Image (cartoon, rainbow, N blue to C red):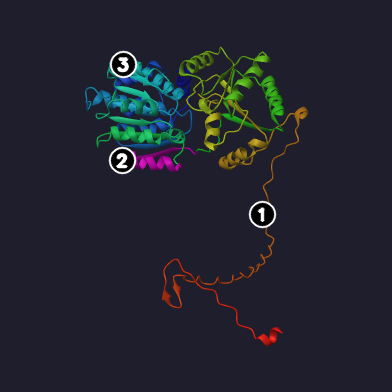
Amino acid sequence: MVALRARLRRTHTLIGGIFLQFKDLGLDNRLLKNLKHYDFQKTTEIQALAIPVAMAGKDLLASSKTGSGKTLAFVLPLLHKSLKSKAFSAKDPRAVILAPTRELAKQVYGELRSMLGGLSYEAALILGGENFNDQVKALRRFPKFIVATPGRLADHLEHRSLFLDGLDTLILDEADRMLDLGFAPELRRIHKAAKHRRRQTLMFSATLDHAEVNGIAAEMLNNPKRIAIGLANEQHSDITQKFYLCDHLDHKEAILQRVLEQADYRQVIIFTATRDDTERLTAKLNEQKLKAVALSGNLNQAQRSTIMSQFERAVFKILVTTDVASRGLDIANVTHVINFDMPKHTEEYVHRIGRTGRAGNKGDAISLVGPKDWASFKRIETFLQQTIDFSQFDDLKGKFTGIKPKKPDFRKKAAPTKVKAAPIKKSAKKPAKRDKGFYQNVAVGDNVFIPKKKPAATNDDNQE
């Protein structure tokens, strides 16, 4: 919450030459009181454009860069709607907010709870990996707002522990990530359970140039208003990016050690490719007396929550993780992000480095590029639409300088010679079998006795 408060204090929107304030949006006074309590006064760009559309009851398809304050862009209008209009159902939730990961869902839930202060509404957090029966008990209290991961919410619909017939508002946060994770069937199941003409749907995505996002938006949204804040590949002015070429794994580890020795960091997030790499690298960093902890997808929810809580409280200075933490982390003290392994998808690079440079702070993003990372690096370079120069340490220079693309071979190839097929030899016809049931054209049956011809008689004269 401290990070969010700082971000909204420092990030403003200029419309018509003046800064737009929350009180200019026509929000309920109880919400303005909560905003004032957290020192939220002026909107960000996505908030200034999205909140009026959502308050008007229209469907919305929006994109904005990470750290832009989009959570309040959908939390405030759904709370205003709940305060100003009657619910469709007394028992069904008024709003469901879906997030792709447990970390992002917990962050959204925290911001929702901060805005519910002084209001007589109950909210529930429904996450995969947690006790199902405890969640059933929470749903039986009929919460008005639910923040959930799509897989677990679909499970509750299947077990009939939740009904969405009277749902007012459905919100999809990071819709592109949910689709990348394969949640399309669950999203369609949730949409079908709450399919009625009065439902409002708000969909937020890192980019609108995503075929699956546009496809599912056509299914779930009704004539939506489209808002795009900045480009997905737009340069982040608060983040300094550096790239180092590495020969092999040992070279990467040597450069990582040098970076950590020279960097004036408060907290660092290091991204690796696999779970095994997180454990191995964390062990090496702890051997160097650096306070590091590993986070990966194979941990249960309680373990992940404990690790994240410790990192947020600065018990650990370094978090080594896979892409499970590339979205949903909002920690202002993260000054450095290091890509020990380059991500496979270009969008993930943007989300990874977006863990630093938040709330108006400056950040550094450092990427280590080896031979196995070269293809990913070239895709990222193309995506960012800029030529990237490599940094280096004079005493850690490597031999790897990149992989040159293969030149197309324009030489005319000789036409393949036609090989004449060998002539097929005709096999001699076998003589037809004689029907032994006939003798001299007279039927004599199966058992035929054919007398042999007697030898011709010889003359006595010849015998002499």
Residue 229 forms part of the magenta stretch: yes
Nearest the eye: 358 or 108 = 108
Horizontally, residue 36 falls left or right of residue 386, namely left
Residue where numbered disc 3 is placed: 137
Residue where numbered disc 2 is placed: 222
x 47%, y 27%: residue: 11
Question: Where is residue 379, by image quadrant?
Answer: top right
x 25%, y 35%: residue: 196
Q: Are marks 3 and 1 in contact (CB under 8 Å)?
A: no
Residue 408 is tagged as 1
Q: Which residues are magenta?
A: 209-231
Badge 3 density bin: few <14, some 14–19, many ≥20, Cα 10 Å: few
Element type where label 3 sits in the image: helix
Type of the residue with mark 2: Asn
Q: Disc 2 to disc 3, how far (Cα)?
A: 34 Å
Q: Earlier in the sequence, mark 2 or mark 3?
A: 3
Q: Position of residue 63 (x, y in %)?
A: 43, 36
Residue 57 forms part of the magenta stretch: no
Q: Disc 2 to disc 1, how far (Cα)?
A: 48 Å
Badge 2 density bin: few <14, some 14–19, many ≥20, Cα 10 Å: some
Q: Position of residue 48 (x, y in %)?
A: 39, 32
